[in-house]
């Protein structure tokens, strides 16, 4: 690896990653380099491997071969004596704090308030004291426009509000990389905009953003780069004007015709 000399933050290197489930390959040699602060959207049909790819970036999935590194540090593995070994859970957790993730279904803890949902991670994983974590959480709730919902439970919030809490929760660990897996797919159409607005505000602030989405207009607007994946292979990538405006691969054109 040559990434260890990097001084920048949020550099993601994905090299020759393959992953199979039950003998079926869902990622077939994916290699991508994401620059610090870059905003990358990933498009592709259902089942093409988008979620699996995101999940390998923070080691929610192991890879069968290849590797992922954030700022030159392997995610989930380490080299010893020329071989790769999977890291123990507590080391994985520490490295995973560099990578935040926002899920399609919010995944908030139902028995915790909005504020408590956000406080949990920095206290548990970063040993921040509760008072400081509370202050941080209140600031983040304000940032996502939910200062008045600190004491609400998830069931008392709309889907759009829940997702904004989930984004605030991901931000609480001050990740260098933030992954969004179809963050608006579970929302009623009228709630999509408020969540996209929050994500849009994060673009260009220095955190590397990787966003799986079917919101093509949004992708065109925020992306530095658009990546099209099909059957576990990166078929096409480039600026939004290229991939969305003038797609070269027939599969990209076919896909875009179904979502536009
Ligand atoms: P996408 O997010 O693009 O819809 P996924 O990465 O979720 O695609 O899934 C890619 C393929 O891998 C699909 O065929 C899916 O059924 C399969 N798959 C995903 N996760 C698992 C799993 N945990 N066990 C078995 N198969 C899985
Ligand atoms: Mg998915």
Image (tube, rainbow, N blue to C red):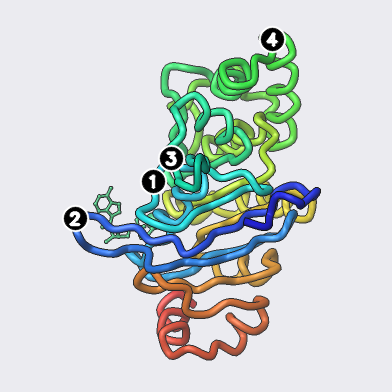
* Picture quadrant where residue 200 is located: bottom right
Residue 33: give x, y in percent of width and height.
63, 63
- Marks 1/2: CA distance? 14 Å
Tell me which image quadrant ligand 1 sits in: bottom left
Residue 195: give x, y in percent of width and height.
60, 48
Residue 164: give x, y in percent of width and height.
59, 38
The answer to whether marks 3 and 4 mark residues whose Cβ atoms lie closer than 8 Å is no
Look at discs 4 and 1 and give the one toward the viewer: 1
Report whether residue 102 is seen.
no
The residue at 46%/38% (across/down) is: 106
Question: In the structure shown, which secondary structural element does the residue marked by tag 3 occupy?
Answer: strand
Q: Which residue is mark 4?
A: 129
Q: Is mark 2 within 8 Å of ligand 1?
A: yes
Label 2 CA crowd tier, 10 Å (few <14, some 14–19, many 20+): few
- Marks 2/4: CA distance? 44 Å
- Marks 2/3: CA distance? 22 Å
The residue at 41%/54% (across/down) is: 51
Q: Which mark is residue 62?
A: 1
Q: Which residue is mark 2?
A: 22
Question: In the structure shown, which secondary structural element does the residue marked by tag 1 occupy?
Answer: loop
């Amino acid at each position: 690896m040559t990434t260890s000399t990097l001084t920048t933050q949020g550099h993601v290197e994905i090299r020759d990653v393959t992953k199979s489930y039950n003998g079926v390959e869902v990622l077939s040699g994916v290699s991508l380099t994401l620059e610090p602060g870059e905003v990358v959207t990933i498009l592709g049909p259902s089942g093409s491997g988008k979620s699996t790819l995101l999940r390998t970036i923070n080691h929610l999935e192991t890879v069968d071969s290849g590797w992922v590194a954030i700022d030159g540090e392997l995610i989930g593995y380490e080299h010893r004596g020329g071989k790769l070994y999977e890291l123990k859970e507590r080391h994985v957790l520490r490295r995973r704090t560099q990578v935040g993730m926002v899920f399609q279904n919010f995944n908030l803890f139902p028995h915790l308030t909005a504020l408590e949902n956000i406080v949990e991670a920095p206290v548990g994983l970063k040993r921040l004291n509760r008072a400081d974590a509370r202050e941080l959480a209140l600031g983040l709730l304000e940032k996502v426009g939910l200062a008045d919902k600190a004491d609400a439970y998830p069931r008392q919030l709309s889907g759009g509000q829940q997702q904004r809490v989930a984004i605030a929760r991901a931000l609480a660990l001050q990740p260098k990389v933030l992954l969004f897996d179809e963050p608006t797919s579970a929302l009623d159409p009228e709630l999509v905009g408020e969540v996209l607005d929050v994500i849009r505000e994060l673009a260009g602030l220095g955190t590397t953003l990787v966003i799986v989405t079917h919101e093509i207009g949004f992708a065109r607007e925020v992306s530095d780069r658009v990546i099209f994946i099909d059957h576990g292979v990166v078929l096409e990538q480039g600026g939004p004007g290229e991939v969305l405006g003038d797609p070269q691969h027939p599969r990209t054109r076919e896909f875009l015709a179904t979502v536009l």
